[in-house]
Amino acid sequence: MRDNRGVSEQHDPVEPEAKVTESQSTVTVRRAPRYYRFMALGVAVGLVVTLVLTFAFPEQDDFSRLQVFGFTGLFIVAICAALGALVAIILDRVSRRRARTVVMDVEHVDAVPAPEDDAQG
């Protein structure tokens, strides 16, 4: 087990009037991928592939290279972003198999409000 450097051992001082309720809860802990990062990587790969395909073939008389880049990029970037999202979904499913169930201690502190001093003047 890893040392948490005493973080869980440090408790805030609780006023004697506060009501402390302790309970245990079962939680599942796992690593989940960030979908937007995979999709952003797919967009970047799609732009590079589009750039390579644009300059790999000779220029046409009907369309400029910028037009070819734009039309090709619309489809390739969208497909690569979707593939990035698909990879993230697959990794998410795999991470669910490695999930661990742990018992978590929960403390609920309900502070009782201090009586107000009516002798202000």
Image: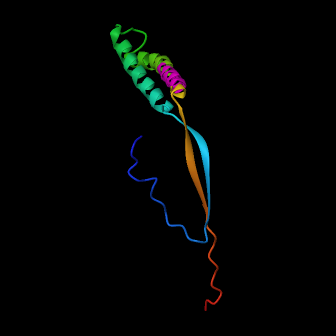
Q: Quadrant of the N terminus?
A: top left
Which of the two residues, 6 or 61, is positioned nearer the viewer here?
A: 6
User: Looking at the image, is 76 positioned above or below residue 9?
Assistant: above
Residue 32 painted magenta: no
User: Looking at the image, is 85 positioned above or below residue 116?
Assistant: above
User: Looking at the image, is 104 positioned above or below residue 35?
Assistant: below
| In the image: residue 74, left or right of residue 24 | left
What residue is drawn where x is 40% and y is 48%?
4
Residue 82 painted magenta: yes
Numbered circles on residues, count: 0
What residue is drawn where x is 37% and y is 20%?
48
Q: Position of residue 100 (x, y in %)?
A: 53, 33
Magenta span: helix, strand or loop, mainly? helix
What residue is drawn where x is 50% and y is 32%?
32
Q: Position of residue 72 (x, y in %)?
A: 45, 16
Q: Which residues are the magenta region? A: 80-94
What residue is drawn where x is 64% and y is 81%?
116
Which of the two residues, 64 or 113, is positioned nearer the viewer here?
A: 113
The quadrant where residue 113 appears: bottom right
Which of the two residues, 46 or 97, is positioned nearer the viewer here?
A: 97
Q: Quadrant of the C terminus?
A: bottom right
Which of the two residues, 66 or 115, is positioned nearer the viewer here?
A: 115
| In the image: residue 58, left or right of residue 88 | left
